Amino acid sequence: MSVPHSPLATNDRIRRAFAIAWVAALAFYFLEYAVRSAPAVMIPELADTFHVSALGVSGILGTYYYTYSVTSLVAGWLLDRLGAKYVVPAGMAVLGAGCLLFVMPWAVVGDLARMLQGAGSAFAFTGAVYLASHAFSAGRLATAIGVTQCLGMLGGTAGQMAVGPLIHGWISVSAFWFGSGLVVLLVGLVLLMITPAEASPTAPRGHGALSTYKTVFANPQSYLCGAIAGLLFAPTTIGDMIWGVRFLQADRAFSYGSAVLAVSMVPLGWVFGCPLLGWLTDRLGRRKPVLAGGALVMLASCLQLVFAPGAATAWATLLLFGVGSGAAMIPYTVIKEANPDEVKGSATGAINFLTFGVTAAIGPMFARRHGAGLGDGVADAAAHFREAGLFWAGAIAAALLLTALLKETGAHARR
């Protein structure tokens, strides 16, 4: 004779199933960040492959953020409507296809491949946060999001520190991208098999396809969250992951190996900073003080690197910068707390759209002002490096000013 399971036991089993799927989604996010950051260590090789200049490579790589930001809206809406079982693996399939296409030696195909990479990657973090929100309680969600970003930045570190030596001794650039595509597709298949199906969508059905985004975008706090996160993300995603190696080589006379080591410290700093700051903001029950503190660490590190480079080694400064930049994940928690529970997937999609919309706008601006002509005999390399650093210091300072306008949503404020 079987004993019926209690609702509490059933609920625990469901949470465990989502937690297991969340762990698999972390592998997706790890791979996505490796794909995002790896081009930083192969700019000359990609320029030869696509027969363009370094600035042309920057343009190809930048298309990633256009599709990433727009597709984030689609990813969030699909997750709220359909759940994660088929939506997140579909994103992995798109990312895998983009990696496979990136081996083709034509710039137009490179644009298309990078756009597919961006579109598929939009499902990684959004899907992982969606699964985490089903697996963990509200009191542990910021910590879970911090751990999620931690694994992503481990991928970012691997995409720079490990891939650099790999493509300069073991495998070709095309072999790296082909192999990456196959691994992404394999992990997507595993995720499809283990992600639990949901009985019904969480989003309301009766208010039109865009009702969830209408709710999110009607809230001014959503825009503040996106702008702050975008301004804090841009120095890492653009300044470090695209231009970092080239700037240190050209303006600071670093060797290739030293430059790769230094810039890889930023995502490594995220590995510690994201869970640490996520835990701290949960512990304090406050979001704004930790967010502002992390931004101040970023600003101080940036200014020290620019005006007093001899005060500390570059890798140590960039490691501290990376730890502080873990604060960029706190607005992802704030936007979920500032909007209704039934639009949690769309809220994550919306902040990804806003965050990387800011990144997509800042990237070409930085490339034109500071990236053009890099390494072509700039008269004053120190001044060139200083101007680029002040560009990112300005972005961080703007994020600090906007933080003052953000409403506190932590547990302490709710009490």
Image (cartoon, rainbow, N blue to C red):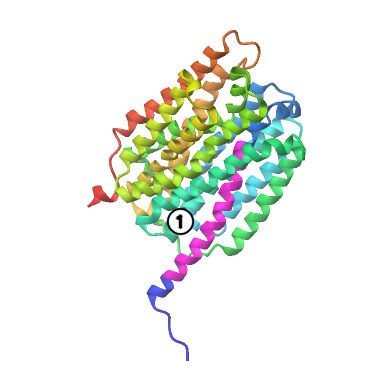
Look at the image and say whether residue 70 sits in the magenta stretch.
no
Residue lying farthest to the front in this orientation: 311
Q: How crowded is mark 1: few (under 14 residues within 10 Å), some or many (20 or more)?
A: many
Does 179 appear above or below 192?
above
Q: Percent x, y for residue 372?
A: 60, 17
Which quarter of the figure has residue 152? top right
Q: Percent x, y for residue 178?
A: 74, 44
Label 1, secondary structure: give it: helix
Look at the image and say whether residue 35 sits in the magenta stretch.
yes
Task: Tell me the residue at 43%/70% (across/down).
Answer: 12
According to the image, label 1 marks what residue? 132
Task: Tell me the residue at 40%/32% (across/down).
Answer: 297
User: The magenta stretch spans which residues?
Assistant: 12-37
Main structural element of the magenta stretch: helix, strand or loop? helix
Residue lying farthest to the top in this orientation: 379
Which quarter of the figure has residue 354? top left
Which quarter of the figure has residue 373? top right
In this view, the residue in front, 364 or 346, is 364
Q: Percent x, y for residue 230?
A: 44, 34
The answer to whether 188 appears left or right of 74 in the picture is right
Tell me if I can see residue 272 in this picture: yes
Q: Percent x, y for residue 121?
A: 57, 44
The answer to whether 329 appears left or right of 182 in the picture is left
Task: Tell me the residue at 73%/36% (across/down).
Answer: 167
Does 124 appear above or below 15?
above
In this view, the residue in front, 115 or 331, is 331
The answer to whether 109 appears left or right of 337 in the picture is right
Task: Tell me the residue at 41%/51% (across/down).
Answer: 143
In this view, the residue in front, 256 or 32, is 256
Q: Which amino acid does label 1 sit on?
A: Ala
